[in-house]
Image: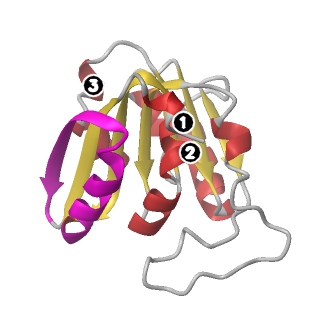
Amino acid sequence: MSISHAADSIGLKERPRYEVKIIEEDDWMKGAQFGAAFAVGVDIDSQAIASASKNATLNNIRPDKLQLHLIASQTSSSCRDDWPSRVVEGENAFEIDKVTHKDKYDVVIANIFLNPMLNLADQIIFSAKPGAIIGLSGILSEQGPKLLQKYSLFLEGIEVSKMDDWVCVSGRKRKNIELMIY
């Protein structure tokens, strides 16, 4: 499941110019290519950030349209869900807050494994404006129900699209949800 498929699933190509927040993906420049006025990419993997920067340059995406952030994480969420988590001394699992709590976005797309998607639910939802479109991809079909159970508290109009063995869950952030978070 790719950012492109997630964006298609939420109808991003037909939407007006939005700011896009894409978390944990090495091709954030897709947000800028889909007509976003501005895109933000966040990852714990320095190689993903380097790759995104290189790809943005190759795709003629200017730095004022794409902001990339390398953050520390208490656990390696770039690993597969069944791999043991590792704690790295001095790293902070909530450093993502420095990026996500600055601004609210019209569209948020997260393309990460299930466990980080569940653990970061509050931060993902909090970074979206009320009524924002949220797309969650990178999830295996059999993991879909667990993701739906968690995010149904935060989203309305939920839709699930499938591509091979992958699902993308999308919906709109409930307008009264800010009172429930934190």
Query: Disc 2 and disc 3: Cα gap in Å?
Result: 25 Å
The location of residue 139, given as percent across then percent down, is 30, 62
Q: Is residue 1 visible?
A: no
Asked if residue 26 lies left or right of residue 158, the reply is right
For the residue marked with disc 1, what is the amino acid?
Phe
Please state which of the two labelled residues, at mark 1 or mark 3, is closer to the viewer: 1
Q: Nearer the viewer, residue 88 or 122?
A: 122
Magenta segment boundaries in residue numbering: 142-164
Residue 92, percent across and down?
Answer: 76, 61
Image spot of residue 65 (x, y percent): 59, 24
The residue beneath circle 3 is 13
**Residue 67 occupies quadrant:** top right
Quadrant in the picture for the C terminus: top right
The residue lying furthest to the right in this view is: 90
Label 2 and label 1: CA atoms lie apart by 5 Å
Residue at (55%, 87%) from the top-left corner? 84
* Residue 98 versus residue 157 in the image, above or below: below
Instruction: Report the residue that reaches farthest toward the top.
Output: 16
Which residue does the numbered mark 2 point to in the structure image?
123
Tell me if residue 135 comes above or below residue 26 in the rendering: above
Residue 107 pos. (x, y %): 42, 29
Confirm or deny contact between disc 2 and disc 1 (CB under 8 A): yes
